Image (cartoon, rainbow, N blue to C red):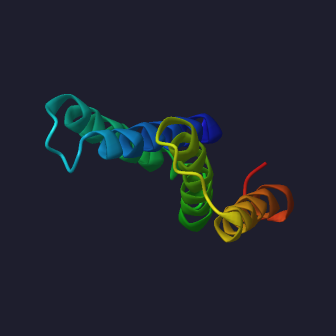
Amino acid sequence: MGYLYLALAIIAEVIGTSALKASQELTRLGPTIVVFIGYGASFYFLAQVLKTIPLGIAYAIWAGAGIALITIVGAVWFKQIPDLPAAIGIGLIACGVIVINVFSKTVSQ
């Protein structure tokens, strides 16, 4: 269940962050409500993750996957295309998440 909750936490965080951009500095009510619900759900699910996955590992995966996904959302919805150095950096973050999941003995498989 840990990885299911982690996936839900990541998705909720990406929804919240996307709505944050759409809220225009929390001045639009609809997107602002989505921000609070998204972040609230994200932290709830992240708290559930910590029952089975160590804190540092869970946070690294949550943050790394969130960065990669929000970059894709930003490129598609908001036309914020990352330049080459940004894309390389995000790729390195994604590689770090993969290394943790594939090679770390800290992560329960």
- The single residue placed furthest to the right in the displayed view is 103
Give whichever of 25, 33 is nearer the camera. 25
Q: Quadrant of the N terminus?
A: top right
What is the total number of numbered labels drawn onto the structure image? 0
Give whichever of 21, 56 is nearer the camera. 21
Residue 103, horizontal then vertical, whole percent: 86, 63
Left or right of residue 35: residue 48: right
Quarter of the view holding residue 82: bottom right
Q: In this view, does 64 lie above or below 40?
A: below
Name the residue: 79% across, 57% down.
98
Name the residue: 78% across, 62% down.
95
Left or right of residue 31: residue 11: right
Q: Is residue 102 above or below residue 48?
A: below
Give whichever of 34, 89 is nearer the camera. 89
Residue 45 can be seen in this image: no
Give whichever of 31, 8 is nearer the camera. 31
Quarter of the view holding residue 75: top right
Residue 35, horizontal then vertical, whole percent: 29, 40
Residue 21, horizontal then vertical, whole percent: 34, 46
Left or right of residue 50: residue 106: right
Residue 12, horizontal then vertical, whole percent: 44, 37
Q: In this view, does 48 lie above or below 67?
A: above
Name the residue: 54% across, 40% down.
73
Residue 88 can be seen in this image: yes
Q: In this view, does 51 lie above or below 38?
A: below
Left or right of residue 91: residue 68: left
- The single residue placed furthest to the top in the displayed view is 30
